[in-house]
Amino acid sequence: MPKIKSHFVCNQCGAISPKWVGKCPECGSWNSFTEEIIDKKEDKNQSTPKNISIKKLSSISGIEVDRFITGIKEFDQVLGGGLVKGSVILIGGEPGIGKSTIMLQISAILTNEKKKVIYFSGEESYSQIKIRADRLGIGNIELDIVSTNSFENIQEILKSNFYDYAIIDSIQTFYSEEISSAAGTVSQIKHITHNLVEIAKSIGTTIFIIGQVTKEGSIAGPKVLEHLVDTVLYFEGDYNRGIRILRSVKNRFGPTNEVGFFEMSDKGLKEISYKELLISSSNFSGRALTSIMEGTRFFLVEVESLVTPTFFNFSKRIANGFDLNRLNMIAAILEKRGGLNISNHDIYLSIAGGLKINEPAADLAISASLISAFKNTPLPESSIFIGEVSLTGEVRQVSNLKNRINEALKLNIKNIFAPGKLDEKDLNFYSINNILDLIKYL
Ligand SMILES: Nc1ncnc2c1ncn2[C@@H]1O[C@H](COP(=O)(O)OP(=O)(O)OP(=O)(O)O)[C@@H](O)[C@H]1O
Ligand SMILES: [Mg+2]
Ligand SMILES: [Zn+2]
């Protein structure tokens, strides 16, 4: 009997190694390698492809992409202006965040517009899907449902009947007979996605692929699929407050990092204005506002922090929605350059609304929040802090200051703390060019 060939695949980035390794040399993940049998039965038509035509770029007529506007403004915005026909969209998110819910709601919109839509579920039965649809008030839509785990079934159906849209919920639960490894492994999900992309491009069906993201990464994450698909959306949010944020991290048909805001209730996801949820009116110490840019949007974000004396030898630092290393850096700058005696304190920092931010423009607001929490004094009312803090303690200008300030003015926030100069009526500009200026003002 021939020896069964196998190799090891990193379930974070898809790197391949002939031997098991503890740490992935490509992406640095620990314990991410799992064994997979190499037994692909594909490669059957390796002959030269027929029907290939080489065209001069100048002779190709550019056709505007064909988009469908769903009417859910926050969703259309994240997609860069609606759904592009024949594209493949990956929607990732943690369990329970609302992936199946939003797809069912989108299905209702599409079927109401007389589109042919099919929903393949590998994890729920027909009646489970029906119960959810009834709860959302869309139990009677003309949606085709297939509960299966076989990718060959999906392929057969999509190739023999034309559908405008197909939903695959979720990629990790389907199994192709052409690959011998288990469902959910890197080889399986890559193989299936690859074939779905081929179907989308050849038939014109728009395909949504739902991908489960687990915190430990024990199951192959959707990360390895990102380069195969056209658009990648991630769902994040604050479970307790019901806020959900949809973000585009890749888009071949629009800007990336677009965000859309939703609220989850028993009737499903509803679009909301972020202002209602991300900004509170009361003024406590440790609370600071900043204006950030995501994709093409500007919006205000609230930073909250708590600073308390350390009881043990090591001070504790926790950051939610913000990079912990950057928080540590800002705290060190406040200590060293600003003379704030913060090192023997525990710091808890969080971004309101479950939002994740990584813009250096938030540095100044983080600094203000920490100073305010440390001194236990609220910041001046209706103030906003915009600027990047450097290791020397200098505060640097950030891009699009005007747009950021405009967002603040819409909410009647008139005290602007930022580096440089700005002469404008209707607002009070406080020039903060060094972290020391900030400490002096507060
Ligand atoms: N009766 C209900 N009332 C309010 N919210 C509900 C109700 N039932 C479910 N939900 C919300 O819907 C969420 C689950 O949504 P959904 O099943 O679409 O998520 P999912 O991302 O597809 O999860 P999974 O990973 O399990 O497939 C729950 O976390 C909860 O917020
Ligand atoms: Mg689901
Ligand atoms: Zn890796």
Image (spheres, rainbow, N blue to C red):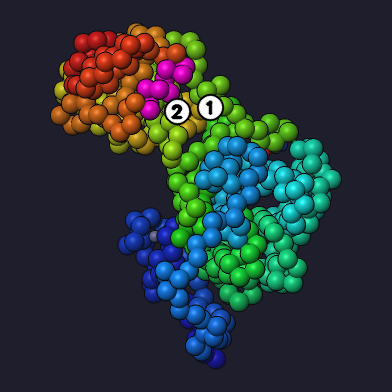
State the residue at coordinates (45%, 71%). Answer: 59
Q: Quadrant of the C terminus?
A: top left
Callouts 1 and 2 close, C-beta under 8 Å: yes
Towards the viewer: 62 or 329: 62
Label 1 crowd (10 A; few <14 / some 14-19 / many >=20): some
Q: Position of residue 433 (x, y in %)?
A: 19, 21
Residue 227 on the magenta span: no
Determine whether 271 is above or below 247 in the image: above
Kindly identify which residue carries mark 1: 274
Mark 2 residue type:
Phe
Q: Mark on residue 282?
A: none
In the image: residue 201, left or right of residue 292: right
Towards the viewer: 376 or 256: 256
Which quadrant would residue 427 be assigned to in this image?
top left
Task: Give the residues drawn in magenta, as a range.
Answer: 403-411
Determine whether 95 is above or below 162 in the image: above
Say whether residue 254 is visible.
yes
Say whether residue 131 is visible.
no
Towards the viewer: 403 or 376: 403
Q: Mark on residue 299?
A: 2
Whole-angstrom CA distance, mark 1 to mark 2, is: 8 Å
Count of picture labels? 2
In the image: residue 272, left or right of residue 259: right
Label 2 crowd (10 A; few <14 / some 14-19 / many >=20): some
Residue 409 on the magenta span: yes
Determine whether 307 is above or below 353 in the image: above
Disc 1 secondary structure class: helix
Disc 2 secondary structure class: strand
